[in-house]
Amino acid sequence: IQFVMMDAEPYDPDNGDILILQNTAAATFDSGQAGYLAGYAAVMDGSTQLGFIGQNKSKDIRAFGYGYVMGADRAASELGVEVSMNYYYCKHASQRDGVYKRAAIMYDKGAQVIFAAGNEIQEAVIEAAEAKDGKVIGSATDQSSKSDKVITSAIYNIRGALKEILGEYTAGSF
């Protein structure tokens, strides 16, 4: 039996070491890189007042956020513009009203676009963007079908990674 793990790696529960056996392929994604591209694109697209709302402080969410800040900074440097960033991690992402309120406040304070990092918060941020005429950058999967306020999504290329792994399997080099 062959196993394919997407956005995860098997590990030894005794010591935490990554443990990829011959019958396992694992594809991981770089949230920092995706966040970087989102921040860079937002500034290159003309936004200079940015927001970030992270669902929590997990490794992936922090990487999205740090990458977003670095990408925005790089684009601002290249364009010679000032960029402001309002940055927030949710304490209770499941509290939809609180997330909506936080996003609405960011938009009221001038945020042109908010990067919503985390599945549990994206809907509330999108609703705030619709109410306040703001823009949203989604994360992990394509959020564009949810609203015309979603200008892009920092996504993982799961389909491409899976296609590559299955191609290796078919070629006998799994």
Image: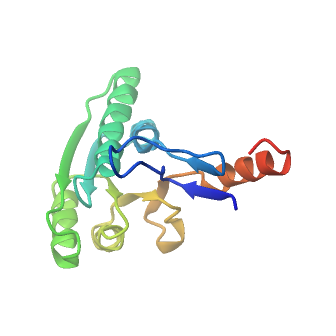
Residue at point 50%, 53% (across, down):
7
- Number of marks in picture: 0
Q: Is residue 97 above or below residue 169?
A: below
**Residue 140, percent across and down?**
46, 57
**Residue 54, percent across and down?**
26, 56
Query: Looking at the image, which is closer to me, 97 or 140?
Result: 140
Residue 36, picture quadrant? top left
The C terminus sits in image quarter:
top right
Residue 15, picture quadrant? top left
Query: Looking at the image, which is closer to me, 3 or 160?
Result: 3
Query: How was this image coloured?
Result: rainbow
Residue at point 16%, 69% (across, down):
92
**Residue 6, percent across and down?**
55, 56
The N terminus sits in image quarter:
bottom right
> Residue at the right extreme?
171
Residue at point 23%, 75% (across, down):
94
Query: Looking at the image, which is closer to me, 63 or 7?
Result: 7
